[in-house]
Amino acid sequence: MRNLVCGLLALAVLLVWEGQSRAGFIVYTWKAEFEAAAAGLTVQDFSAAQVSAGSAAFITGPLTSSTNNVVFSPGNIAPGLTISSSGSSQTGGNLLYVPGVGTVGNDAKGVYTNGSDATLSLTFAPQVDAVGLTLLSFTNNQGPITFNLSLLGSTSSTPQVFSTGPLPTSGMGTFFGFIGTGGEQVQRVSFQPSSGANVGVTSVQFGTPVPEPTSLVLMVTIAGPLGLVGWLRRRRAV
């Protein structure tokens, strides 16, 4: 029994060490699975946006916790999150588009690029261990369009690039989540269309997961048998 428990403990330590020693990201496309692994994050939606259903507003960026305009008031955007748009050929400085519910087939308010050639960026300062995003697109009746997702971590100056696959133009959107391993954190997530279209985000989750993911679970799982062995030894000594 003792040898079995010691072996299990050694295996758990090895798994924890190996998982934490590799810098990278675990990628999630199922929201429930991400939230199970990354509980306790800050949740940012855009329900506070002062825009009516069926209408929309064009605003300058970036959006931060101190933004104060006709759509957002100070505190409507969570501290540590900055939303910006760049590269648009649109004139006038209104780089962000905020549609009300149902304006572009969306079931929730969100923040979109204003211009199909624009890049939408979400920057986190300080950098965070986990980020979850719900995304929609607006394609002027072209149907779902694929975007390039650029993920800049804390351990490299070169971002990782993913394909989102065709993003829906209506409904609740598509989910993507990232949890850093081996000390890796998220600094910025950006979206560039592979074909002219506007990308929008309707929800952002970010921060440090509570409790810490799987490593803690593994240790607790193995600690159980160790505690039982100790208890049995004490019982035998009585």
Image (cartoon, rainbow, N blue to C red):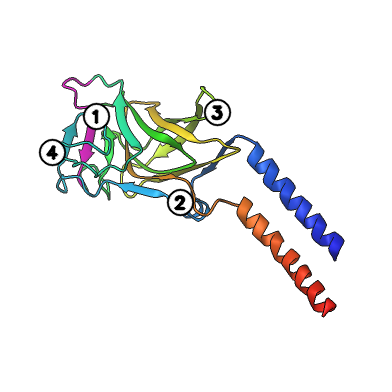
Q: Nearer the viewer, residue 6 or 203?
A: 6
Mark 4 vs 2, N-terminal side: 2
For disc 1, the neighbor class at 10 Å (few under 14, some 14 to 19, many from 20) is some
Mark 1 vs 2, N-terminal side: 2
Query: Which disc number belongs to residue 31?
Result: 2
Dots 2, 3 in contact, CB < 8 A: no
For the C terminus, the image quarter is: bottom right
Bounds of the magenta segment: 90-101
Residue 99 is a magenta residue: yes
Distance of label 2 from label 3 (alpha carbons): 26 Å
Q: Nearer the viewer, residue 32 or 146?
A: 32
Distance of label 1 from label 2 (alpha carbons): 28 Å
Locate residue 229 relative to residue 60 in the image: left or right. right
Residue 18 is a magenta residue: no
Query: Which disc number belongs to residue 61?
Result: 1
Tag 4 residue: 70
- Point out residue 69 in the picture as x, y percentages from the top left corner: 15, 36
Q: Nearer the viewer, residue 27 or 194?
A: 27
Query: Which disc number belongs to residue 155?
Result: 3
Mark 1 vs mark 3: in front: 3
Q: Main secondary structure of the magenta part?
A: loop
- Amino acid type assigned to the residue bearing label 4 in the image: Val
Mark 2 vs mark 3: in front: 3
Distance of label 1 from label 3 (alpha carbons): 28 Å
Query: Which disc number belongs to residue 156?
Result: none
Mark 3 vs 4, N-terminal side: 4
Residue depicted at 17% across the width and 33% down the height: 58
Distance of label 4 from label 2 (alpha carbons): 32 Å
Mark 4 vs mark 2: in front: 4
- Amino acid type assigned to the residue bearing label 2 in the image: Lys
- Point out residue 192 in the picture as x, y percentages from the top left corner: 38, 27
